[in-house]
Amino acid sequence: MEIVSLKQLNKESKIELLKQLDLGTDGIFVLKKNGEKYLDKSTKEPIKLDNMLILPGSIEVIDNNPVSLIDYFDEHGDII
Amino acid sequence: MNMGTSSDSGLLPKDPIESFAKGAAEGTLKWTKEEISKAINRLANHDLAFIEDIDIINEVKAEKTTEEFKLYANYIQDKELRKIVQLGLTLRKYNNGTDASKVSNLRDRIVERFGSDGLHIAEFVSSKRLSKYISSIITSSSPSTTDISKKIEYMLKNIDTFTMFIKSEDSLEIRFEQIKTILYANRPETFIITGTRTARNITSSLEYKIKREMYGYTTESFDDGIENVIFIKKK
C-alpha cells in the first residue's frame, strides 16, 4: 500500500480527483454530485477539502479524525 | 505501509510517495487527469491511499498496541464500547498535550458518533477511572473473566446511572441525599463519585458520611492530588 499526501497535491488536482470520484467541492467542503455536502460516514458531519482522506475499500472519502479512522479500520482492517 | 519508496508500478510518474517522504512543499504537486485516473484505479485495487497526514493514522493504530488497551480489550467484547475505550485513550493523550483544539475536536466527533454517553465513557477511560474500577472489582473478590467483562460492560453502558461528578459549589447534604436515593432505589453493585481539585473536599466528606450512615455499602477511594474517585460498593 502506498500513501499519497493530499497536502502536497495542488487544489486543481484535488478538485479533479474528487470529480473523477463523482464528487465536487465549493472550495471548502466536499460536495455530492447534486451539490449537497458530502457527509462523513461515521460522524455524519461535512468533510472539509483540507481535512479529507480517500481510502481504499469501496473508495471512501472520510474526515481525518480518530473517530472516523477507528470505524474505517474496524470495517476494513488495518489495511493502511 | 510504504511511504519511502518509489511507485514500482509506474502509474504515478510524479512520484508523490517520494515527495511525501521528502516533505515536498504543500500544494505543489500537480497531476494530469490521466495520472489521477491511474491513481484511482490503484485506489480501487487497494494499492494506494490518499491521506492528509500520517500522524492521526499512526496514533489510532498505536493506541491499540498499548498494554492498557489490550487489558481492556480482554474484558470488553462489545465492539462499539471497545472503540469508545480506544478513543478515551486518545483523548487522554490529547489532554496531556498542548493543543486544546485537538481535545475539543475529538470530544465533538465522539459526541457526533456515540452521543453524550459515549463522551462520558471516553472521559471515564481518559481519567483512568476505568482502570481504577477494574482494579476495584478484581481486588474485592476473585471474579471470573466473564464476570469482570459483564460488570465492566454493564457499568460502561449505564455510565450516567452509576457515576456522579461532584462540583465545588455542590451542597454536601443535597448530594448525600441524592446518593442515598440512588443507592436504595437501584441497589447498584458499584456507584462512583468523582471530584476534582476543590471538590475533592466534598467527595471526601461524602465518603465519610456514607461509611458512617449507610448500612450495606463500603467505600474505596483513589486520590492522586487532582482527582478524588470514590467507589461505593455493595457489601
Image (cartoon, coloured by chain):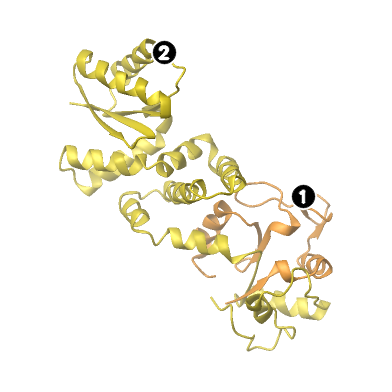
Q: Nearer the viewer, residue B111 or B94?
A: B94
- Secondary structure under the numbered disc 2 in the rendered image: loop
Which residue is at a point 70% across and 50% down the rendered structure image? Answer: A39
Q: Position of residue B50 (x, y in %)?
A: 66, 69
Indicate the quadrant where residue B127 lies: top left
Query: Where is mark 2, residue-wise?
Result: B171
Which residue is at a point 83% across and 56% down the rendered structure image? Answer: A27
Query: Where is mark 1, residue-wise?
Result: A37
**Which chain is displayed in yellow in the rendered image?**
B
Q: Nearer the viewer, residue B207 or B9?
A: B207
Indicate the quadrant where residue A3 lies: bottom right
Q: Nearer the viewer, mark 1 or mark 2?
A: 2
Q: Is residue A34 left or right of residue B186?
A: right
Q: What residue type is disc 2 on?
A: Ser
Q: Position of residue B93 (x, y in %)?
A: 48, 51
The chain holding disc 2 is: B
Mark 2: give few (<14), some (14-19) or many (20+) Cα within 10 Å.
Answer: few
Position of the C terminus of chain B, as image quadrant, is: top left
The chain holding disc 1 is: A
Which residue is at a point 68% across and 59% down the rendered structure image? Answer: A52
**Which chain is displayed in orange in the rendered image?**
A
Q: What residue type is disc 1 on?
A: Lys
Q: Nearer the viewer, residue B33 or B224?
A: B224
Have a look at marks 1 and 2 and say if they share a chain: no
Q: Position of residue A18 (x, y in %)?
A: 77, 65
Q: Is residue B98 left or right of residue B34?
A: left
Indicate the quadrant where residue B165 lies: top left
* Image vertical order of residue A63 relative to residue A10, above or below: above
- Secondary structure under the numbered disc 1 in the rendered image: loop
* Image vertical order of residue B226 relative to residue A47, above or below: above
Cα separation, mark 1 vs mark 2, equals 47 Å
Which residue is at a point 31% across and 19% down the rendered structure image? Answer: B206
